[in-house]
Amino acid sequence: MEISGSGLAGRIAAVGLLAVSLGGVAVYLRPSEAARLAMRARLLASGAREGRVAVDRLPVRYFDSRPGRGDGEAMVLVHGLGGHAESWAAVMPKLSRGTRVLAPDIAGFGGTDAPPEGMSFSSLTKCLGGFLDEMGIRRAVLVGNSLGGAVSIKYVARHPERVERLFLLNSAGLLDEAPSSLEPDNREEARELWGITAGSRTALPNFFLDDMVRRAKSPARRAYLRSGEPTDVREDLPRIEAPTTIIWGARDGLIPRSHGEEMRAAIPVSELVMLPEAAHVPQIQAPEEVVSIIRGRLAS
């Protein structure tokens, strides 16, 4: 059967319209998942490979900017509570120029299941160490955001010989207890959480707020917040030997600037760099500045 040019064009247009419509439905139903998939596509387009490695029999999902080119050294990007490796999509391609960069989903988040021993600060730190071991990374540059910063601090304090340099982005680790705002139960609480982490009071559609409430009920996230083990790095800070750059989004309403200043005072060789326009997740909110700071410090 022959199809005329106009008929073929019409079918192509219909398929395109269907794809856009399905994409719109996906964004409406699961906006955070749609955003993650878009960031995943960006990472894969940059040449990164997605893989899994068994860490104590737990399959840990990760992205590798230079697969097959390992020499025992790498930069490792560690995301925060409820996050995923894709949160580094805006910075990983540029950081990987001349450097192997790895971005894992830490235990319980993204595409990595919760560890058999349960969710806790200790189990996440153990997972990071096991990941470095299984990937053959003898010496790393660690870059951690929020909870990922606290996990990185705990690891480098215990294994100073394994970390060349440390970058902390609005790191957790000094709050006496987890803020109740991390578990919104309704749209208003979700709107408040967005405001303090994004540094913005932008009006958000209800389907986006509903998705935030739904994600806050993640079993792994709730298990971590109820583990009973505090995310406390106070005693670890003076033990850090690696030169440390603390990058802080000034608009963060979740973790105050004073925590960055306290870390700066406690870590022997450290500096604090403020980003006026960023909030709790600088790698997303100010990616160019983050890349410039990290590359500049590594080159000096």
Image (spheres, rainbow, N blue to C red):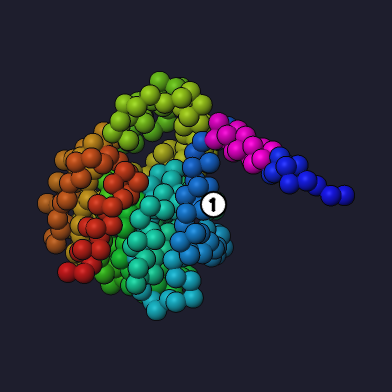
Q: Give the SS element for disc 1.
A: loop
From this viewpoint, is residue 223 visible?
no
Q: Amino acid at mark 1?
A: Gly
Q: Residue furthest bottom?
A: 71
Relative to 148, 130 lies left or right: right
Task: Report the front residue among 3 and 120.
Answer: 3
Q: Residue furthest front?
A: 5
What is the span of residues highlighted in magenta in the rendered image? Answer: 13-28
Q: Is residue 227 above or below residue 185?
A: below
Coordinates of residue 133 in the picture (x, y in percent): 43, 70
Quarter of the view holding residue 20: top right
In percent of the image, x 21 and y 69: which residue is there? 299
Q: What residue sits 56% from the left and 60% below the top?
A: 59
Identify the residue under disc 1: 111
| Residue 216 shows in this picture | yes
Residue 162 placement (x, y as % from top left): 31, 70
Give residue 238's position: percent from left, percent from top.
17, 58
Give the residue at x 53% y 61%.
50
Is 142 located above or below residue 184 in the figure? below
